[in-house]
Image (cartoon, coloured by chain):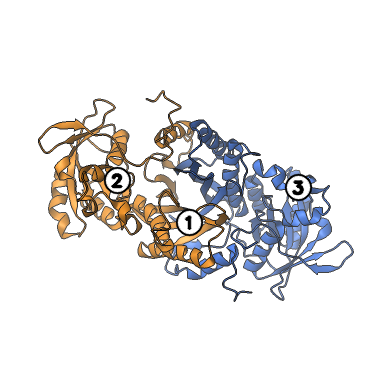
Chain colours: A orange, B blue
């Protein structure tokens, strides 16, 4: 697959970009391209950075979302990246390309949504860039975070025998939840204090695609229990709620791996600490081929699980 | 003018956003919205942040620029912001919205341009976000910088009696120079070591508009000498080269204010230290009204100078 250089794919492009890096001499760069946030050293402290683009017609539709909701979501996506590293949001900068038809009032509404999330999660907006064009709205939020009491949690630390856990319920976010979701910033820091998190990611593209990221980075495979997936109410009435839960994007829940004993402890103690539900959904196994995901059906059979979800810049 | 809240203007929007800030309790934020870069404290060290958007059809035209040039320019704009603060570029993250029609090869060319600037100015790209849509190309570069041997230079420190200096030549950048300009990163740090820079900005929107920013932030006014403006070769043959030099955007030269004695020292010693030319173009005077810019013509008459240049999100 790696030889099919002309296959168009967001992930293949990122992989190519990673290969171009020449940051051997960048001794202050701890984690570069390929995790939820980059990690750099400033004044001896770990500083984390993420950037997230939201595009009209792709990530939101102004016929179904208010500008305030769009602003909130733009910040919340980056806050979710902070959660995925168990990091503490610090400050943000916001760059916007506004449609020329937008009024001052509408621009203010957008900012009010950004500001709501900034205040709720204590992450002030300290700068930005305002441009305009005769094209749809585009917003980019870049966020800095600091390491909390615990180390940043990478995607790459999953170990064979680990239990895979997930917060909240999955599937159907695009039916409305994606505009008002709560990034799991507090939950991830609490989890990091209660257990040693080996690997973590936020589910932005879909459980299967994001679990596959953890497996690739950790050089392991995973087995998911079909019956254990916490299916969201939004998809329970669909013909195939399981597929929606496994492949719908924008849930922005946490997906993470811990030792079996830590998993037991979390499942026992978590309900007394948080109202967000926590589910054990599978386990990390040895990787034997490029197929890294498997699913155990209700009848006990184990099948390969297709990596399916949202991918930008593909031919699909 | 300030009461006309419905007048549509990038700068009025930014002013409104500044008024919404509630970062009194954000004790780690030293400089927020309104300078070339925000300044925050991390591990006791000053860290600077800037974000810059480049839009197809606004900041570049793919019929006249290669994707490599566009990538280079995207990084160079943020590097120029670092120069404007006399800061040392550290790391960057790059977010792109790629047109769906773009090929993998084209995406790689864009990255190669970004990477060229990253390597030339020692500012590795440590992360990003790749999205795509059926709209034109948009690129956002967010850059972090560290304070160098000297403190970051704000826009707000110009003092009555200061001399106004500018690097390089002005005007006509859009005829080609904007795709290959050299951000004055080294020059600004050298200047900061040779003199006490009271206020500085990079000329991105045009000399008059950017000098007006310095004047507003410093609560002063300025008098420019028409004959002293270093007019670029690209506009010397125009009917009105002076206006082009005063109001053309994207020169990305440094515009700064120093005491009269420091100005004298710089004009004497600079030519031996750098091949970039340095011109004294005017002086800082007391502000007596909202009209902050004046121009001294060749015949000695002094007239108000219209603040004219590139402004996004205006009705114009």
Tell whether label 1 touches label 3 (CB within 8 Å).
no
Q: Position of residue A52 (x, y in %)?
A: 43, 49
The residue pinned by badge 1 equals A93
Give the letter of the chain under mark 1.
A
Residue that lies at the very extreme toward the left in this rendered image: A299
The residue pinned by badge 2 equals A248
Residue that lies at the very extreme toward the front in this rendered image: A239
Name the element at disc 1: strand
Give the letter of the chain under mark 3.
B
- State the CA–CA distance, disc 2 to disc 1: 29 Å
- Left of B91 or right of it: where is B192? right
- Of residue B92 and residue A135, the one placed in the foreground of this image is A135
The residue mark sitting in front, 2 or 1, is 2
The residue pinned by badge 3 equals B277
Residue that lies at the very extreme toward the top in this rendered image: A3
On the question of residue A290 being in view, the answer is: yes
Name the element at disc 2: loop
């Amino acid at each position: 697959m790696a030889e099919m250089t002309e296959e168009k794919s967001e992930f293949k492009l990122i992989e190519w970009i990673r290969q171009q890096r020449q940051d051997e001499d960048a001794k202050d760069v701890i984690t570069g391209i390929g995790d939820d946030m980059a990690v750099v050293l400033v004044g001896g402290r770990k500083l984390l950075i993420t950037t997230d683009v939201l595009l009209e017609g792709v990530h939101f539709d102004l016929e179904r979302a208010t500008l305030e909701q769009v602003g909130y979501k733009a910040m919340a996506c980056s806050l979710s990246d902070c959660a995925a590293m168990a990091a503490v949001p610090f400050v943000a900068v916001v760059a916007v390309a506004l449609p020329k038809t937008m009024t001052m009032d509408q621009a203010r509404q957008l900012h009010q949504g950004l500001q709501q999330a900034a205040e709720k999660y204590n992450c002030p907006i300290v700068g930005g860039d305002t441009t305009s064009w005769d094209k749809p709205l585009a917003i980019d939020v870049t966020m800095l975070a600091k390491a909390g009491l615990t180390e940043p949690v990478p995607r790459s630390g999953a170990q064979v025998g680990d239990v895979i856990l997930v917060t909240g319920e999955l599937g159907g976010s695009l039916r409305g939840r994606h505009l008002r979701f709560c990034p799991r910033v507090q939950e991830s820091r609490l989890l990091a204090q209660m257990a040693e998190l080996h690997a973590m990611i936020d589910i932005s593209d879909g459980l299967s695609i994001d679990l596959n990221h953890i497996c690739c980075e950790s050089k392991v495979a995973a087995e998911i229990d079909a019956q254990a997936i916490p299916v969201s109410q939004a998809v329970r009435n669909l013909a195939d709620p399981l597929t929606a839960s496994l492949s719908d994007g924008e849930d922005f829940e946490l997906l993470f791996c811990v030792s079996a004993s830590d998993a037991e402890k979390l499942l026992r103690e978590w309900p007394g600490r948080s109202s967000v539900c926590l589910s054990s959904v599978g386990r990390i196994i040895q990787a034997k081929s490029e197929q890294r995901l498997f699913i155990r059906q209700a009848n006990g059979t184990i099948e390969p699980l297709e990596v399916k979800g949202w991918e930008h810049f593909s031919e699909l």
